[in-house]
Image (cartoon, grey):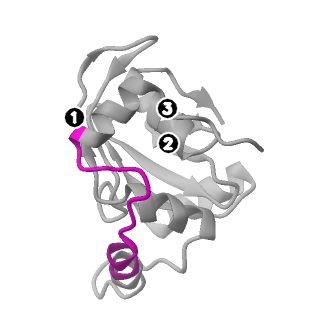
Amino acid sequence: MKRVELEPEAVRRLKNSGWEPGRNVQHLVDAWVEQLKSMPDGPQFSEPPEAVIEMLREFGGLHVRVAGPGRTMMRYPFTLDPRKGLLSPAAYAQLSQQAGSATYPLGVLYGEESAIAGDAQGRVLLITSIGPMIEGIDIHDALNHMILGVRPENL
């Protein structure tokens, strides 16, 4: 599958949030994975799928500030940090079953208060109050949608 390209507005917003092409925060990803595997009083997660590690390696730790009307829905700020918007491992197990693919936390979409998850196929999913949604077929597609305010699809 061909990777979706980031739209110019998404690139601008991401750069304003600290991203640059080729960014690599593997040291943060390693620390987050260890934290989530060994949380003493909270939920514990297993290893993330490789596709999720790749997403976090380039975009992890970013807080993107967007607000107001978008193309098809309101835009809300989001943070790509698997420790944010954390739900129980059972919620991700249920999402994995619904998606037909292993999932792992990616972050949180504020305003909607939705958990952002990635899956082994490279898709970005949302766990929302109305059910699971597909935010994008890959991380670039999802970032375009969240930054530009494009309504996600039902899973």
Looking at the image, is 10 positioned above or below residue 104? Answer: above
Q: Residue at x 71, y 58 (%)?
A: 101
Residue 18 visible in image: yes
Is residue 21 one of those drawn in magenta? yes
Amino acid type for the residue under numbered disc 1: Arg
Cβ–Cβ under 8 Å for marks 1 and 2? no
Quadrant showing the N terminus: top right
Identify the residue position indicated by label 3 in the image.
Answer: 130
Q: Residue at x 45, y 37 (%)?
A: 143
Relative side of 106 to 2, left or right: left
Q: Residue pushed farthest front?
A: 21
Q: Which residue is under mark 1?
A: 65
Quadrant of the snapshot with the C terminus: top right
Asked whether 16 or 68 is in front, the reply is 16
| For residue 83, side relative to residue 48 (left or right) | left
| Amino acid type, mark 3 | Ile
The numbered mark at residue 57 is: none
- Residue 54, x across and y down, in percent: 53, 64
Q: Is residue 155 magenta?
A: no
Look at the image and give the residue range highlighted in magenta. Answer: 16-31
Q: Residues within 10 Å of mark 1 (few under 14, many from 20)?
A: some
Q: Position of residue 136 (x, y in %)?
A: 58, 37
Give the alpha-carbon distance from disc 3 to disc 2, as whole Å.
10 Å
* Residue placed under numbered mark 2 in the picture: 126
Element assignment for label 3? loop
Nearest to the observer: residue 83 or residue 137: 137
Q: Is residue 132 visible?
A: no
Q: Residues within 10 Å of mark 3 (few under 14, many from 20)?
A: few
